[in-house]
Image (tube, grey):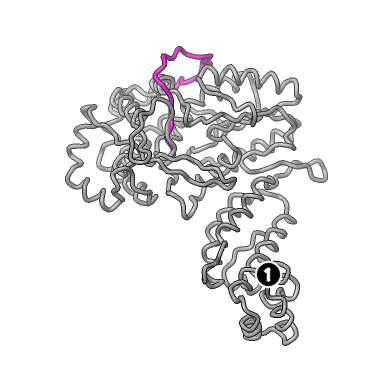
Amino acid sequence: MSEDTRMSKAMRQMLGQPGRVSVARGEARRDLASDESCGPPLEHPHTGSAKHMAGTGGLLEAALTRQNLHAAWKRVKANKGAAGVDGQGIEQTAQVLHQSWPDIRQALLAGSYRPKPVRKVLIPKPDGSQRELGIPTVTDRLIQQALLQVLQPLIDPTFSEHSHGFRPGRRAHDAVKAARAYVQSGKRVVVDVDLAKFFDRVNHDILIDRLKRRIDDAGVIRLIRAYLNAGIMDGGVVVDRHLGTPQGGPLSPLLANVLLDEVDKALEARGYNFARYADDCNVYVGSTKAGERVMAYLRRLYTGLKLQINEAKSAVASVFGRKFLGYALWVAKGKEVKCAVAKKALENFKARIRQLTRRSGGRSMAQVVEKLRPYLLGWKAYFGMAQTPKVWRELDEWLRHRLRAIQLRHWKRPKTIYRELKAMGASEDVAKQVAGNCHRWWRNSAMLLNSVLTIAYFDGLGLPRLS
């Protein structure tokens, strides 16, 4: 998985991104693997020892209680997800379930319920590529959310303390803080592992085997298997799926953590310092030689789970040349290790701002700012740990420069520019000079125009400051 994808996943978990198919906190991702027999590959003795066995039986009945379903429906409704293959949104589904729920509930308890295929949706990424989501129907999201609410409190406490992704009370910042602490302690070499198409390659049989070690309820296991085997509709054609858990359903993050916890426990048993967020795992060691040993060990562990490391994107290297969840690390005075926004994340920020402000289409500056606000506030919240004030100031300056250029383009003609600037209190000299260079949008939007479209002007429009 690419760094852009990992960072965007982390941001979605914290905030949700406007303008995208909504797959918010309780509702996450699905995408798993094939019917291959699964001997226990390289299993650590404590793996899955949640025998704790999530209560013995009765979990499906607990998931389908009125109280639990009501809470699940509130979450699904709040997430405002898109319709699935049946084309039914939240309100339409509510009307249908009013009549059909008794039959659906009976089918769930009898083990005869068959989930509908997920709807394939491609989401553009900042680098121009696309990320695939599989959007379940609202009914299936409700059932998955109800299951999640029963399973997560039982399973999550058994996960490694080094796992931070898609867990209650944990977030990407915790993983970055852990990484910084390891580096501060002297672990300056990172084993940075990128799994190749993790959510497309999860093996169904191995996952179900690991799930059975944690919960003892045949009805729940059967239903989760049915969700894994549900096809994906692409262009009106349903394609069977024998591998993977498509990203888009509430259960996917929990299932991913169930599978990858085996690797966490194996690393813990050897005393390694590491941080994992979803399928992104970084191990911190004191030397390149030690890092190479860890990389070889991880290859064996992942191979045992029938997962594949992306060798082109994985490396044993200095931590100061790598990035983790959109952050980079650097050493300040006094040898203190600090966080910065990684170069790629900064490039993606500017690309997204350009996308949001492209061709303002006759919108006023206030409307342009209103469109930018959710993204800017979310980005600022996610990268709030960055300790680089100069970078924040430069981004603010670049953003205001771009908005001034957009305003000139909007006014377009010299007479209009002159008139509008005078109305805003510009001096005669400034209004004439800016209007006289009206076709040099970018160059003309600095210097003199700054005295009219000031920082206070943008503050008044509600433009968030990053610095």
Pointer 1 local density, CA inside 10 Å: few below 14, some 14–19, many at least 20? some
Residue 204 sits in quarter? top left
Find disc 1 in the rendering and name its residue. Answer: 441
Residue 205 visible at all: yes
Please name whichever residue, 179 or 86, is drawn nearer the observer in this view of the structure: 86
Q: Is residue 52 visible?
A: no
Q: Position of residue 120 (x, y in %)?
A: 40, 40
Point out the image quarter for the C terminus.
bottom right
For label 1, the SS is helix
289 part of magenta stretch:
no
Q: Is residue 353 above or below residue 112?
A: below
Residue, far right: 334
- Which residue is rendered at x = 54% and y = 28% of the image? 160
Q: Nearer the viewer, residue 140 or 183?
A: 140
Looking at the image, residue 208 sits to the left or right of residue 381; the answer is: left
Kindly report the secondary structure that dominates the magenta region of the rendered protein: loop
Q: Which residues are magenta?
A: 29-50
Q: Amino acid at mark 1?
A: Trp
Residue 423, above or below 373: below
> Residue 173's spot in the image, x, y percent?
60, 43
Q: Is residue 213 left or right of residue 65?
A: right
The image position of residue 172, as x and y in percent, is 57, 41
Q: Estimate the x, y position of residue 188 in percent, counting from the top left.
A: 75, 31
In the image, residue 43 lies in the stretch drawn in magenta: yes
* Quadrant the N terminus occupies: top right
The residue most toward the top is: 39
